[in-house]
Amino acid sequence: MSILYDEGQRAIASESRRVLDARMDKARLLALLEQTGKYDQPFWDTVVEQGWTGIGIAEDHGGLGLGLIELGLVAQACGAATSGAPFLTSGYGVASALQGGSNADAAALWLPKLAAGEATAAIAFAEGSAPLPLVAATPFIDGKLSGTKNGVAGGLTADVALVWASVDGQPVLVLAELSGATRSAVDSFDNSRLYADLAFAGTPAVVIAQGPVAHALAMDVMARVAVIAAHEQVGGAEALMLTARDYALTRRAFGQPIGAFQSVKHRIAELYGLVEIARANCIHAAALEGVCGISGPGFVTAAAAARISATEAYDTAARDCVQVHGGIGVTWEAGLHLHMRRARSLAIEAGNLFFWEDVLVNELQGQAA
Amino acid sequence: MTESDDIAEIRRAVAGLCADFPGEYWRDKDRERAYPTEFVTALTQAGFLAALIPHEYGGSGLKLDAAAVIMEEIQAAGCNGASAHAQMYIMNTLLKFGSGEQKRAYLPGIADGSLRLQAFGVSEPTSGTDTLSLRTVAVKDGDHYVVNGQKIWTSRAEHSDLMLLLARTTPADQAAKRTEGLSIFLVDMREVVGNGMTIKPIRTMMNHSTTEVFFDDMRIPASALVGEEGKGFRYILSGMNAERVLIAAECIGDAKWFIQKATDYAKERKVFGRPIGQNQGVQFPIARCYAQMRAAELMVHHAAQAFDAGGKLEGNLGAEANMAKLLASEASWAAADMCVQTHGGFGFAEEYDIERKFREARLYTVAPISTNLILSYLAEHVLGLPRSY
């Protein structure tokens, strides 16, 4: 493939940015921080109206039949705007499991709804500190789920969840309607992520994949979601880098713009380097995606690299942008803390750094042997 | 913190002595891989290496905090105390755990320099920092011990009359505790070199006289045993704290040398019509190194004072000494790197001495104990985290 975006992809990038610039409102996002269980409805309406929910879903199921490159570009725009709801990423993750799994009925039922934005979905894999435990402590017996999944992003309002569970010590990936689960809201520092503790007690669910295939599919979902999250992180980091640049050009101290001081401008130049490295890793990973099925060799390695570099870029940009702004950077109104918070929530949602570093080490060991 | 007049006087005296050994002297030694005998002799004659030996044995009976200043000043003057620092601290084990007879027999000679105790035989090829797994054995045979095995990284063995040697006297599986079964011997090398002991120099990236030492049925008198048999590991741990503090002080001296050198150059070198030190990209790294060095310096003095208080201060002396070495060695290495960067191409030219000091400074995040082992120690013994190795 070409390493350059084609015309259609460039149009997606600029249009998604334009729409979000026009419709997002910092004051709305700031207000959401102080409420539990609310997300930014205008943001989500825009996502649905623009058809972004259908990007990664095959045309047969009502989607646009595009892939990670296109969805990644939209995610970058969402990251720059600190997206007001978590469903674009998680919905894509669940859709990719339905497309790669073996349950045609579930796929036929849910993919059109997810593509049209009529339903939202969450991913409930993590237990304790393990983003994807080897054996889940969430039993699935006779078509029913029990146990709990804590801190599930989007879990508070999503219609369905893809759940990492186990049956007779074997892994199983199931889809459960959350109307049958008990949800408790988690009050967090980034409330529009809609974190919830999910408790299942005989909740009906259907099998998407079982046995070793389930693990491979779950890992594939993790990697795809990581690539989307990494794009979102890159979008956020780039926005912060540009914000820092703009401030350094206009803010004057000691008779000159602060950007004339090397300690300020070099710091911003280093952010530029971090953002571009992470972006390159994201493009590489997105370009390796398999089509509507389990991805080929190299994808997981590339996804891990994208995720690790994007996490570092966003975290560093969040810290340095505040530093460049000085006192104004820590004010509520300036809103840099929206990114500071999002940098941390995105850093842990789609598998934390430890997880992806371990994945990367394992993948590279396999190559060296 | 104002220093006492005594300490200030020590600094002046050491700086005065070091002025006779300029960069040129060290460059020549470095080029020829030669031992700086003249420098070590001058330090000995001035009594600096006997700083820690009590008055009754002919030393100056200084506290470790004062002795540390001697090592710091040597490095800050651009000299290399690694050639002689062991003469100062190895005797500590003898002083603390040796018999009255041993102390009377050896300490006065060590104090006046007629006896060089510069070699510390601990590390082995198969047991670096894992001291307890060492394989050199000493077997009692009548009124002698017979030693077989090998040591590595035994610095200055070619320039020493005595060696403090750690060897296993009880097989590990028969020792009452994991940390028992090792013993310390004060070996008179003059009697065994070529007669059971063979020394082979190891060439390194800097002029550091380190060696491998081989023991082949080396017979030493039973009177060479220091303290009780089997307790050697505990004895050397105590001596290692002094070693770490003194080497940490050397690192502080190195950092001061690099910072001074970089500061002078940044003021005087002009590019784009002004001193390069007017650029924040140049001056901030120097300032950061200064702050890092000062913080480490406080830790070094704190550790030295904890040592001098003999465990009567709060805290864990091993941890304090190790942290001082860790922070000081990182400060000196950061300053070394910064100094090369500040000087641009000139940092690589021999005549500026920076590349030589850079090579020398690199040693101390590795020796006498590596940063990782210090972190493991702090994690396990101070913070109570699970042992990681």
Image (cartoon, coloured by chain):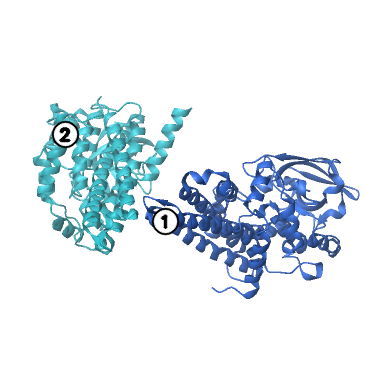
Q: Disc 2 marks which residue?
A: A10
Q: Nearer the viewer, residue B361 or B371?
A: B361
Estimate the x, y position of residue A206 in percent, counting from the top left: 24, 35
Estimate the x, y position of residue B229 in percent, counting from the top left: 79, 54
Give me the chain letter of mark 1: B
Q: Disc 1 marks which residue?
A: B277
- Few, some or many residues within 10 Å of mark 2 (<14, 14–19, 20+): some
Chain A drawn colour: cyan
Q: Nearer the viewer, residue B287 or B213?
A: B287
Chain B drawn colour: blue
Observer able to see residue A122: yes
Q: Nearer the viewer, residue B342 or A202?
A: B342
Task: Say what amino acid the circle numbered 2 marks.
Answer: Arg
Q: Quadrant of residue B74?
A: bottom right
Quarter holding the N terminus of chain A is top left
Q: Is the residue at mark 1 from the same chain as the one at mark 2?
A: no
Q: Are marks 1 and 2 in contact (CB under 8 Å)?
A: no
Dot in front, 1 or 2: 1
Where disc 1 sits, the SS reads helix
Give me the chain letter of mark 2: A
Q: Is residue B130 left or right of residue A323?
A: right
Residue located at (31% from left, 56% from top):
A261
Residue located at (69% from left, 56% from top):
B85
Task: Say what amino acid the circle numbered 1 marks.
Answer: Gly
* Residue farthest front in this picture: B273
Quick check: A361 above or below B154?
above
Quick check: B54 above or below B106?
below
